[in-house]
Every structure is written in structure tokens, then in C-alpha cells.
Amino acid sequence: FHQQMRDAVNEPHEGKRRNEATWGITRIHYERSRYIYELYYKKKAISKALYDWLLLEKHADASLIAKWKKPGFEFLCSLQAIDKRNSNFGTTAICRVPLHLRKPGSTGPSVSTGCISCASQEAGRLSG
């Protein structure tokens, strides 16, 4: 994940919108945190001490993992998706709306995160 993150940061951003340049970084951040979350909570493959060390060293996002443990946020892509300060109308990102409840033609990725759908009824999917 470290090498993937380095590649995403160094990826050329010419021809992309300003927000699109960070989508790869957001996706890798999600995948890395999700991997550690599943190792500890789902598979029970790592110890509590190792899990705490990984969070302490910022190998996973503790705040994002805390949200995943709450009902309705199991597949949350990023904390940016629920931050109402980043929205023009004080709402969450479009990726939090299930695909079947959206207007036709509005199934594109979220502008801030690049996520297509991270609502609980959907399997969490990030574009990219």
C-alpha cells in the first residue's frame, strides 16, 4: 500500500479536474484502512497490540474505522463524504445515496471522493 500511495501522489494530474487528482489517494487510503479493519475485526488475524500500533503509526484511519462500526456507515468511503461543510447545501456527498434512489443519470462518482456508492445497501465501491 505504501508504494501504491507513493505512485498515486506522484501521478501526473494534467488534464484532470482539481478534485480528480485526489481520487486515487482517497481510494488507496480506504483500501489500506479497510484491509487493517478486516484483519482485526472480521478475520481476527492480528493482535490488539498490533492493531493499536498500526493506528498509532497512522497506517489506518482510526476515525474512519470508528464510523464503519456504526450502523449505516459500514461501507463509508471517506470522512469527506459525510462532512457537511464541504457541500454547497449542507448535505452529505452523492455517494451516500443508494443508487436505486438517485435520479436517472446521476450515478457518476462523487466530486470530492471519486466514490460511486458507499451507502449501506450497496457494496462499497470506489471508482478508479
Image: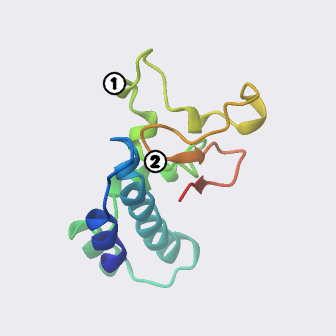
Considering depth in this image, is 57 or 15 the residue closer to the camera? Answer: 15
Residue 105 location (% of width, % of height):
72, 30
* Rendered residue at 45%/14% (across/down): 89
Q: Which amino acid lies under the numbered mark 2 shown in the image of this protein?
A: Lys
Would you say 21 lies left or right of 38 here?
Answer: left
The residue under label 1 is 85
* Rendered residue at 41%/59% (across/down): 24
Residue 67 location (% of width, % of height):
46, 47
* Rendered residue at 46%/37% (across/down): 111
Residue 116 location (% of width, % of height):
60, 46
How busy is the neighbourhood of tag 2: few (under 14 within 10 Å), some, or many (20 plus)? some
What is the CA distance from the residue labelled 2 to the residue labelled 1?
18 Å
Earlier-in-chain disc, 2 versus 1: 2
Considering depth in this image, is 97 or 7 the residue closer to the camera? Answer: 7
The residue under label 2 is 67
**Is mark 2 in CB contact (under 8 Å) with mark 1?**
no
The N terminus: image quadrant: bottom left
Residue 55 location (% of width, % of height):
29, 67
Q: Which amino acid lies under the numbered mark 1 shown in the image of this protein?
A: Arg
Q: Nearer the viewer, mark 2 or mark 1?
A: 1
For residue 5, above or below residue 43? above
Q: Secondary structure at mark 2?
A: helix
Give the residue furthest to the top.
89
For residue 59, above or below residue 115? below
Numbered badge on residue 105: none
Considering depth in this image, is 51 or 126 the residue closer to the camera? Answer: 126
Considering depth in this image, is 119 or 128 the residue closer to the camera? Answer: 128
Give the residue furthest to the front.
15
Q: Secondary structure at mark 1?
A: helix
For residue 12, above or below residue 70? below
* Rendered residue at 48%/72% (across/down): 35
